[in-house]
Every structure is written in C-alpha cells, then in structure tokens.
Image (cartoon, rainbow, N blue to C red):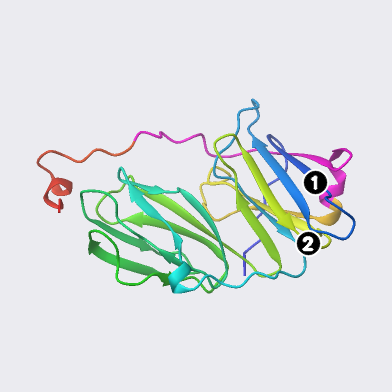
Amino acid sequence: MFDTGKCFKITGLTLLLMFVALSPIQAREVVVTVTDMAGQPLEGAVVSLAVGTTEWSPRSMNEAAVMDQVGMQFLPRVLAINTGDYVSFPNSDNVRHHVYSFSEPKVFEIKLYADAPKEPLQFDKPGIVVLGCNIHDGMLGYLYVTEPGYVSGTTDKKGNLRLQTNGHISGARIWHERLSVIETELVELSEKGIAAFESGENTYLVTIDPEVPAPDAAPEKPSPTGFGNTMRR
C-alpha cells in the first residue's frame, strides 16, 4: 500500500486535467497536462486515478516492461507499471552496471552485468521504487507500481498524458520526483478535492508546490582512468 499519510499542501505547480467523455457508457479518455509554476511542462509526473475496478492483467515474464540503461542513465527515468508486472533491466551501455533498490515495495540488486539479466523481476507490491547503480552514483530512476483499483500514466516531454479509463473517478494521486526530498511522497486528492479544482466543463486545474529544484540533467561521464572505465565490457 502507498503511504499517503504525508501529502503536500496544494500551492504552486499547475496540473491540468481534462476529462473527455467518449460516451456515457464507453471508456473515457483522460488527458492530463502537467506544468510548473512558470507554465513549463513537467516530464515524468505520474497521475494515478482511482477507478474502483481495473481489468488489466499483470505483465508476464515474456511481456515484461523495460527499464533500459542508456548513456549511463535509466531510460525511461520514470516508468509506471501495474502491481504484479515484470520489468526487464537491459544494459545498452558499453560499461557494466549494478542496479539496486532499497525501497520498501521491492528490495533487490542485480550485480555487475552487461547486456541483460537472465530474467526480469516481478514487482508485486504497490509503491514507488527508487533505482540506483552501485557503480555510477549519477544514475537515478523510478518505478511507480500502481495499486489495484487505479490506472496510472507518466507525462511526456510536453507534460502530456492520456489515459483510458472505465467507470467513475473517485480520487487521484499525483507524484513527481521534485515534490519532496523524500522521493516517495505524493499528493492525494479525494473526489471532493478534484471537484473543488474544476475550472471548466470536464477540466480541472490543480496547483501544488515542488520542494526540490530541477536537477542537473547532464549525464555522468566515465573517468578515463577511474573505476567506471575499468568496468567496460
């Protein structure tokens, strides 16, 4: 279960939710745009909508989601999956990586390797899994493991997200790595909370204030004579 006891006061980052009903009885499309206080789009924000029931089946080992490693960065940096899904961690770099997490939903490590591990890993508990590399400190990634009863998605470079959902939306959870220095905190809105931010027909405008400034996006470079260089394939 997600720990929602620590939620942020809604103050400063703009989250635009546009709910477009395709028909009264069919699935509806949810279009989400996330920007910061200055109106700049935020990539990698996760919006998780409470819909009561979900019809998805967990990804099998053969259909595993992919968290790649390219340019000594996790790609994508943020990946939203469902509880029970398998995830593969291929290494597309020409140096070896050692992937690990100490997060409560899944404590694991994949020791120093090239190419790809033999098998993907299953994530059977909901929550936020923070990923690191034991060789390259600058590598950081996140898995958002969606709780049953919710549907989730991650915003693109333009801050946009589209979700298909059935049934009544009774709440929402919003996460971004900049929300707090505690990277697993999120904002939870009740059904009444969402309605309070309705700014037009099927349009919701919510503001929250991130605590952490935007990180330096420059990729880590291996030292020509350092440890990273000795880990080349």
Q: Secondary structure at mark 1?
A: strand
Q: Would you say the residues marked 2 and 1 are in contact, meaning their CB atoms lie under 8 Å apart?
A: no
State which region is magenta. Answer: 193-218
Number of residue marks: 2
Question: Which amino acid, mark 1?
Answer: Phe
* Magenta stretch holds residue 212: yes
Q: Foreground: 110 or 81?
A: 81
Residue lying at 88% horizontally and 60% vertically, measured from the top left = 25
| Observer able to see residue 232 | yes
Residue lying at 47% horizontally and 54% vertically, measured from the top left = 142
Residue lying at 63% horizontally and 32% vertically, measured from the top left = 36
- Marked residue nearer the N-terminal end (2 or 1): 1
Quick check: 221 left or right of 38? left
CA–CA distance in space, label 2 to label 1: 12 Å
User: Residue 154, how many percent across, how many down?
Assistant: 59, 49
Label 1 sits on residue: 19
Q: Secondary structure at mark 2?
A: loop
